[in-house]
Amino acid sequence: MVETYVFGHKSPDSDTITSSIVMAYLENEMGNSEAKAYRLGNINKETEFILNYLGIDAPELLESIEDGADVILVDHNSPAESIDNLENANILKVVDHHKLVLETSYPLFLRFEPVGCTETILCKLYEENGVEITKEIATLMLSAIISDTLLLKSPTTTEDDKVAVKKLSQIAEVDAEEYGLEMLKAGTDLSSFSIEEILSLDAKQIDFKDVKSIVNQVNTADISEVMVMKDELEDGMNKIIEEEGLDLFMLLITDIVNSNSQVIALGNSAGLVEKAYNVILKDNTVLLEGVVSRKKQVVPIMTENA
Ligand code: MN
Ligand code: MN
């Protein structure tokens, strides 16, 4: 049988990595295809914590695929965030919780739900198809939901995510609060990363109408610990702005304990941040109270004001 590549987005987060593993397992259990999970970039510290906790290896790095290869996309559907030659692939399925942008010239299986995490949808797919959620699978799913919803505190959180967390923590036999905080904190350890790596860890290219932007989000348990690097971060951001011809680079430093984000905004369109949030940037930075979700609290409001 031909192998099916299962992968999430570039700059992989915990949802992308765990969903690739969980989706590949589901495909194999259902006998649909010989599916294998891959990743499109380096594993972050939080995902490393999850994989170490379970004692499992990270999926193999995928640099390119052959034309006509069968692929399944999870946790993304935008070609810009996917493998470079996606247009030549044969996309079999997409399971995602982001805005639909993908267009194909052929029919395919799509499962999109406006929930907090891809794993919440996968949890339903296991149930619908009568596939047993093992302790390991439950831990992967649970970890990703905690990650994407910041322990169910992000405004992206839905009732379905809460139901899934309750059920999965029982199967995984973990205390979601305790395990989740430990996992999120592991993800905030930036000590081994260079400035360039920090600026690309969770960077997304998003255009707010004509404003060509990158929005990068870094989680922390203490904003001041990241702000000590402000000068170096700004140098790095300015370099990327120049190289990529950007109008705006927004760095969100998100306090996962208190649910706020300090934003550093650079570029000719930095004023858009002031307009969108009715704030004034001082030394290129300001605290955005209660803002933790790029998808719900940044993209719509920035687009609206652009
Ligand atoms: Mn993701
Ligand atoms: Mn996700």
Image (cartoon, rainbow, N blue to C red):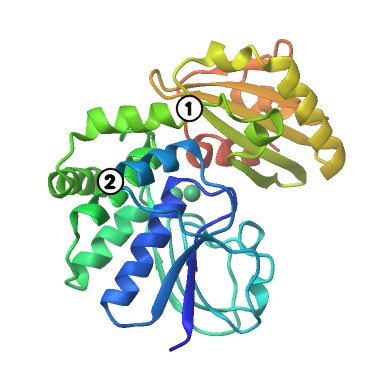
Mark on residue 138?
none
Determine which residue is flagged by label 2. Answer: 142
Residue type, numbered disc 2: Leu
Q: Position of residue 211 (x, y in %)?
A: 76, 42
Mark on residue 188?
1
Residue at disc 1, secondary structure:
loop
Q: Is the residue 258 above or below the residue 49 in the image?
A: above
On the picture, is 234 further left or further right than 37? right
Q: Residue at x 23, y 66 (%)?
A: 126
Q: Quadrant of the C terminus?
A: top right
Q: Could one spot residue 156 in this view of the protein? A: no
On the picture, is 297 further left or further right than 110? right
Q: Is the residue 23 above or below the residue 52 in the image?
A: below
On the picture, is 270 further left or further right than 97? right
Along the viewing direction, whichever of 266 and 209 lies nearer the viewer = 266
Q: Position of residue 209 (x, y in %)?
A: 71, 47
Q: Residue at x 59, y 78 (%)?
A: 104
Disc 1 packing (10 Å; few <14; some 14–19; many ≥20): many
The nearer-to-camera label among 1 and 2 is 1
Q: Quadrant of residue 186?
A: top left
Residue type, numbered disc 1: Thr
Q: What distance separates the C-alpha of mark 1 from that of mark 2? A: 19 Å
Q: Quadrant of residue 165?
A: top left
On the picture, is 138 further left or further right than 89? left
Q: Earlier in the sequence, mark 1 or mark 2?
A: 2
Residue at disc 2, secondary structure:
helix
Q: Residue furthest bottom?
A: 1
Mark 1: C-beta under 8 Å from nearest atom of ligand 1: no
